[in-house]
Image (cartoon, rainbow, N blue to C red):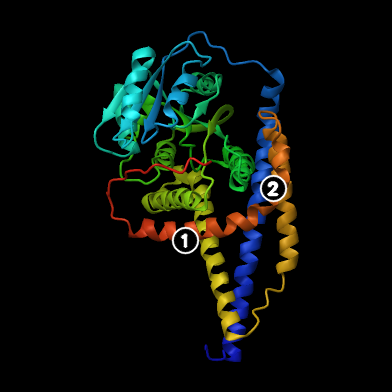
Amino acid sequence: MIEPVTQSLQNVLIVVADALSDFIYIYPVFAAYVWMTGALYYYFKWERKELKSASLPQFESYPLVSIVIPCYNEADHIHEVIQHLNNLNYPNYEIIAVNDGSKDNTSEILLALMETHDKLRVVDFVINQGKATGLNMAAIVAKGDYLICIDGDSILEPDAILWMMRHFIQNPRVGAVTGKPKVRNRSTILGKLQTGEFSAIIGLIKRAQSIYGKIFAVSGVVTAFRKSAVHDVGYWSTDMITEDIDICWRLQIRHWDIKFEPHALCWILMPETLSGLWKQRLRWAQGGMEVLLRYPQIFHYKEQRRMWPIYFEYLISILWAFSVVLVLLFWFVSLAANFPLGFSNTSVYGVMLGLTFMLQFFISFYISSRYEKGLYTYYFWLVWYPIAYWIIIAATSVVGAIKAIRRKKGEHAVWESPDRGV
C-alpha cells in the first residue's frame, strides 16, 4: 500500500501533470495546422495545376534508369513485383534485385525469373549484409545514372518513373525524389488506420516540409536517386537502422535538393498485427533518433539553417512522447496513492484535438482522392487514430530513443522480415 502523498507533493504533481497534459494536446494540434497550411499551399500552388493538365511528362531523351529491389525473405511477393515492373510506362530501364542472404527460396525464384525477364539482373549474397550494403552493391553494378529503390513487396504504378524523372531532368541539383506509398492491405482495423495515416499524416507532412524547408525522410519503399549524388555523399550508411532517413539528411546537408512527387504511386503491404506494427514503428523511431544524434553539427553552419526546423520538430516530438509516458505514470501513481491529479482542461482539449484531426483527415483525403478513389470510406475509421496510435507512437519513440542512445557506434545494421499484413 502506497503511503498518502503530502499536500505539497500533490500540488507539485498536479502542476507538472497539468503542464505536461497541456503540451501533449497543444503540440499535435499546432503541428496539424502547420502541416495542413503547408500542404494546402503546395496543392493550390503546384499540384492542382498538374492534375488539371492530366498530361504525362515527356522528354527529348529517356535516360537509363536502374530499379533496385533489396530482398530478404520475399518469396511470397517477389514474383508479383517483378511481373509488374516489366510493364512500366518508360522505355529505358533495367531491374536489379539484390537477394540479401534470404533464408527462404527468394534466391531460386529470382534466378528463375532472370531466365525469362531480359531486364532483370540478380545480385546474390549468401550471408545477410543489411539493406544498405545491398543498395550500395546495386548502385555499383547499375548501368543507369538514376536509381529507383523500392521494397520487395512494392507494386510500382506504371507512370511512376516518368513523374520522378522529370525533376532530375528539369533541375541538376535534385539528388532524390521521394514518391507516395499507398497501403494495399486494408482488411483489418490497423490496415484501415494506416491507409488514412499514409494519406493524412505522411502525405501532408511531405507536402508541408517541401514548402517550409527540407524533408525529414524519403520513403524507403519508393525513392529515386541521382547516382552521382549518392556517390557524392558516400552511398548508404551500413551502420544506421534506417538508411533511408540517413541518406536523406546527408544529401540535403551536401545541398542536394529532395523533391516530393505525389504522382509517383507505389502500393505497399503494411503490418496488420500489433506486434508487427510495434517492430516497424520502433525501427522508425530509433532511426530518427540516430539521425539527431549523428548530425547536431548542422547548427555550427549558417548555410545549414534550413535543416534546423526539421531537427527541432523531431526533437520536440520525442519530448512529446516522453511527456505522454510521464503523464500516464503520474496517473497510475495518483490512482495508487488515492489523490486526484486534475487534468482540468482534458475535455476541452479532447474536443479540439478530435475536430482538428478530423479536419486534417478531410483535407488530406480531399487532396489524395485525386489519385485514388474511395478514400472517404475510411474516414470514420480514423476517429480511433489518436487513441490507438498515440500510445504506440509514444511508447516506440521512448524505447527507440533509448535504444539509439545505447547502440554502439559503427555497429552494422542488418534487417529482419517485416510483418506484411493479412
Question: In the rendered structure, which amino acid carries the disc numbered 2?
Answer: Trp
Outermost residue on the left side: it is: 126
For label 1, count other residues whose C-alpha is less than 10 Å away and answer few (under 14), some (14-19) or many (20+). many
Q: Quadrant of residue 180?
A: top right
Percent x, y of residue 129 = 28, 38
* 228 up-or-down from 42: above or below: above
Percent x, y of residue 198 = 59, 41
- Classify mark 2: helix, strand or loop: helix
Can residue 303 be seen here? The reply is yes
At horizontal 59% and vertical 57% (from top left) the residue drawn is 390
Can residue 231 be seen here? The reply is no
**Side of 376 relative to 392 (left or right):** right
Q: Quadrant of residue 11?
A: bottom right
For label 2, count other residues whose C-alpha is less than 10 Å away and answer few (under 14), some (14-19) or many (20+). some
The tag on residue 398 is 1
Reading the image, the residue beneath label 2 is: 381
The tag on residue 333 is none
**Side of 294 relative to 355 (left or right):** left
At horizontal 28% and vertical 52% (from top left) the residue drawn is 409
* 350 up-or-down from 293: above or below: below
* 289 up-or-down from 421: above or below: below
